[in-house]
């Protein structure tokens, strides 16, 4: 009888111990998830991360009512943000903010060319964080070229026109894959091109064989391209939507897929960019026909892209 009681007490003790460990594990998991969420928010202007429905990014800070905002680029460490914006009847400029002491600094204008060019747009921070490529011009559809600045200790160098066959035409919207290959849109030919990275130089340009589209952004591993083109969701629509091309095993690009009506609306979706951590798609939505705002910056989980990826 005593042995049975002892065995019963031992069994109860084991069950209680196991329960405590499970509860502790669940608490630790919950705390970890909360910490992860806080980290995500801190790296994105303390914003609540979006799901599968796009949200306006940092309203009143980055996305300001009545201003036309577009292309976004974060540094690889997610502690710097650059974006293009312009007010009515003003030239486009690049703005930036930095994360210092867990706080984002007030947004300021970069002015990389120091007045050499009237407009600056389409910033892209290179994967190694040492350079920013951007578009500069004096007037639209006339002299768009790709320029760059190099990182100094706590600032950026004077802007330099990229010395490459790339700039033999009117070009814009530069961005890079992880290996440094440079992708851009050729306005003269109205096609997407890329230039393989040759020790930091771009001596050769190649057309990217895509069915249609412009403002193309290459994924870090070059397994997909996301871009802007006329909507095909309904007959008679004239607005631009975003599409994704996935790369086939033979290196060609599959047929484009519309991101769908939860992303694409009756307004113009444009200038897509993927964050360095691969978690979010940023883009501009042209809402100049409604109040308030001309064009705001939106963000959404990249699950919207992965959900369209062909099953292997």
Image (cartoon, rainbow, N blue to C red):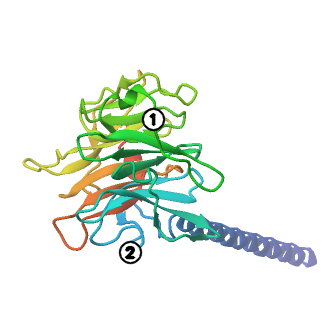
In the orientation shown, which residue stands out farthest toward the right? 2
- Residue 60 badge: 2
Residue drawn at x 25%, y 69% is 293
Element type at marker 1?
Answer: loop
How packed mark 2 is, by other alpha carbons closer than 10 Å (few <14, some 14-19, many 20 or more), is few
Residue 72: x, y in percent? 41, 55
Question: Along the horizontal axis of the image, is 200 left or right of 25?
Answer: left
Assign the C terminus to one quadrant of the image. top left
Assign the N terminus to one quadrant of the image. bottom right
Which residue position is annotated with label 1?
162
Q: How many marks?
A: 2
Question: Along the horizontal axis of the image, is 129 left or right of 257?
Answer: right
Residue 123: x, y in percent? 43, 49
In the orientation shown, which residue stands out farthest toward the left? 236
In the depicted structure, whether residue 121 falls above or below residue 59: above
How packed mark 1 is, by other alpha carbons closer than 10 Å (few <14, some 14-19, many 20 or more), is some
Do the numbered discs 1 and 2 sit on residues whose CB atoms are within 8 Å?
A: no
Can the viewer see residue 311?
no
Q: Nearer the viewer, mark 1 or mark 2?
A: 1
Residue 189: x, y in percent? 24, 29
> Looking at the rendering, which quadrant does residue 94 occupy?
bottom left
Element type at marker 2?
Answer: loop
Which of 10 and 41 lies nearest the eye of the viewer? 41
In the depicted structure, whether residue 109 falls above or below residue 138: below
Residue drawn at x 17%, y 48% is 233
Can the viewer see residue 285?
yes
What whole-number distance in Å separates the C-alpha atoms at marks 1 and 2? 34 Å
Residue drawn at x 43%, y 22% is 204
Residue drawn at x 36%, y 39% is 145
Residue 30: x, y in percent? 62, 70
Which of 91 and 97 lies nearest the eye of the viewer? 91
């Amino acid at each position: 009888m005593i042995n049975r009681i002892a065995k019963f007490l031992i069994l109860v003790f084991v069950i209680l111990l196991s329960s405590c460990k499970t509860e502790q594990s669940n608490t630790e998991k919950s705390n970890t998830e909360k910490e992860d969420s806080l980290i995500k928010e801190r790296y994105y202007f303390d914003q609540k991360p979006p799901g599968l429905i796009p949200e306006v990014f940092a309203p009143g800070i980055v996305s300001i009512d009545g201003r036309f905002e577009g292309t976004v680029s974060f540094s690889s460490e997610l502690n710097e943000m650059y974006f293009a914006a312009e007010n009515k009847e003003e030239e486009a400029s690049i703005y930036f903010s930095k994360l210092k002491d867990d706080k984002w600094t007030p947004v300021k204008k970069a002015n990389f060319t120091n007045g050499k060019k009237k407009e600056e747009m389409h910033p892209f921070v290179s994967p190694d964080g040492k350079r920013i490529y951007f578009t500069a011009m004096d007037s639209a559809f006339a002299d768009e070229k790709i320029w760059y600045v190099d990182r100094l200790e706590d600032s950026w160098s004077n802007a330099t026109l990229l010395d490459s066959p790339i700039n033999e035409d009117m070009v814009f919207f530069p961005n890079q894959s992880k290996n440094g290959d440079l992708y851009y849109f050729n306005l003269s030919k109205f096609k997407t091109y890329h230039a393989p990275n040759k020790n930091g130089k771009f001596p050769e340009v190649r057309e990217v064989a895509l069915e249609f589209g412009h403002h193309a952004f290459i994924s870090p591993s070059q397994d997909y391209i996301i871009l802007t083109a006329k909507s095909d969701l309904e007959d008679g629509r004239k607005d631009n939507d975003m599409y994704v091309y996935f790369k086939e095993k033979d290196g060609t690009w599959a047929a484009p897929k519309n991101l769908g009506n939860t992303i694409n609306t009756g307004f113009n979706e444009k200038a897509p960019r993927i964050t360095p951590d691969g978690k979010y798609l940023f883009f501009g939505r042209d809402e100049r026909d409604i109040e308030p705002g001309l064009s705001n910056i939106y963000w959404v989980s990249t699950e919207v892209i992965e959900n369209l990826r062909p099953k292997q």
